[in-house]
Image (cartoon, rainbow, N blue to C red):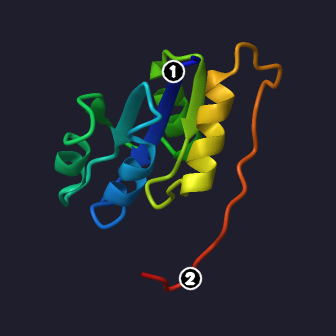
């Protein structure tokens, strides 16, 4: 089975991060979180899922994502935002892909939906 690094950047995401982490915890070989100085409980919540959390400065969105990517050590990387979560179908599809002997693609695009003012 291929391995999967999941990278997440955060700042003050305590209301959203648990849903995100719950959605990826069973498929991630490693979870990498870079936090930009949260003043809420984000880092403590993340530490319930991984020890691989680092509090850093904020160099901008792209550079912060790159910092997280540079820490990834697995065959594949899923970059997900703290307010996003995989549904069961997407998680199952990722597992099927990771179980393949050979993966010929170099990248995958995930479908997404937007919910405005949803709980």
Nearest the camera: 99 or 62?
Answer: 99
Contact, CB < 8 Å: mark 1 with mark 2?
no
When asked about the image quadrant of residue 103, the answer is top right
How crowded pointer 1 is (Cα within 10 Å; few <14, some 14-19, many 20+) is rated as few
- Percent across and percent down for residue 116 are 56, 82
In the figure, 115 relative to 37: above or below?
below
| Residue lying at 59% horizontally and 41% vertically, measured from the top left | 62
Q: Which residue is mark 1?
A: 70
Mark 1 or mark 2, which has the lower sequence index?
1
In the figure, 30 relative to 13: above or below?
above
Quarter holding the N terminus is: top right
Residue 116 disc label: 2
Quarter holding the C terminus is: bottom left
How crowded pointer 2 is (Cα within 10 Å; few <14, some 14-19, many 20+) is rated as few
| Residue lying at 16% horizontally and 47% vertically, measured from the top left | 44
| Residue lying at 81% horizontally and 25% vertically, measured from the top left | 105
| Residue lying at 19% horizontally and 42% vertically, measured from the top left | 48
Q: Secondary structure at mark 2?
A: loop
Nearest the camera: 31 or 87?
Answer: 87
When asked about the image quadrant of residue 47, the answer is top left
Q: CA distance from mark 1 to mark 2?
A: 32 Å
- Percent across and percent down for residue 28 are 45, 32
Is residue 10 at least partly visible in the picture?
Answer: no
Q: Can you name the residue that lies furthest to the right here?
A: 104
- Percent across and percent down for residue 74 are 52, 17
Q: Secondary structure at mark 1?
A: helix
């Amino acid at each position: 089975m291929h391995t999967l690094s999941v990278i997440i950047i955060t700042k003050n995401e305590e209301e959203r991060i648990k849903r995100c982490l719950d959605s990826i915890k069973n498929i991630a070989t490693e979870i990498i979180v870079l936090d930009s100085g949260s003043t809420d409980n984000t880092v403590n919540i993340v530490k319930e899922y991984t020890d691989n959390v680092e509090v850093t400065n904020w160099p901008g969105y792209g550079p912060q994502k790159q910092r997280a990517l540079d820490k990834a050590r697995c065959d594949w990387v899923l970059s997900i935002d703290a307010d996003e979560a995989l549904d069961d179908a997407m998680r199952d599809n990722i597992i099927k892909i990771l179980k393949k002997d050979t993966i010929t693609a170099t990248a995958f695009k995930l479908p997404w939906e937007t919910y405005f003012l949803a709980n």
